[in-house]
Image (cartoon, rainbow, N blue to C red):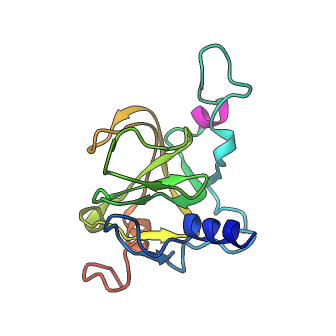
Amino acid sequence: MPAVVAIAALLVCPLVLAHGGQATLGAPTALAVSGVLPAPPAGVAELRFNEMFQRPVGPKGLEPSARLLALDGLLVRLVGYMASAESPTPGRLILSPLPIALSDEDEPLADDLPAQAIFVHLSGPAAAHTLPNYSGLIQLQGRLSVGASEEPDGHLSSVRLMLDEQASQQLLPPASPRRLR
């Protein structure tokens, strides 16, 4: 049993990724989720990962749910885990329903991203920064964009969350010289 606990700890809160990856930090206080969240602010819809696709999966495979399509272009709040990346892309992170680590070593585009993974784009000065890998659940609020799109690193995304400048700044580590006060 201790081996199972040790393996789970390594998957959820790795200190350093294998092969020289970045260290993992605790999520910024303003974004960390440690209990029951209050209702989102007025004008912001709550979207859960399990609401993204039609169920059961039909003969056409995964199809966006009516709820996901209805929220396209609107402000939403999502709660998930930041995918831990060996080589993060500046101005972007991937939000996942479960803790995952992405590796660039063998097959960088043949990764284990869940179908519900959401590509989160930063804006303003924060878009030029590469974020550290944050552990734990985080909440993000931004404008939802649904539809196929190619990301700068070659990934194909079907759902994106566009953060405004203030939300983007909250993701920067405190020591960052461009953090707004």
Q: Position of residue 38 (x, y in %)?
A: 72, 68
Pick whichever, 172 or 46, lies toward us: 172
> Is 164 left, or right, of 40 in this rendering?
left
Quick one: quadrant of the N terminus?
Answer: bottom right
Residue 22 picture quarter: bottom left
Q: Can you say whether 20 is above or below 103 in the image? A: below
Quick one: quadrant of the C terminus?
Answer: bottom left
> Is 150 left, or right, of 141 in this rendering?
left
What residue is shown at x 52% (from left), y 38% (from top)?
Answer: 72
Residue 138 visible in the displayed image: no
The total of numbered circles placed on residues is 0
Q: Is residue 35 magenta?
A: no
What residue is shown at x 26% (from left), y 44% (from top)?
Answer: 152
- The region drawn magenta spans 66-70
Q: Position of residue 142 (x, y in %)?
A: 49, 55
Q: Position of residue 4 (x, y in %)?
A: 69, 65
Assign the magenta stretch its main secondary structure: helix
Pick whichever, 148 or 125, lies toward us: 148
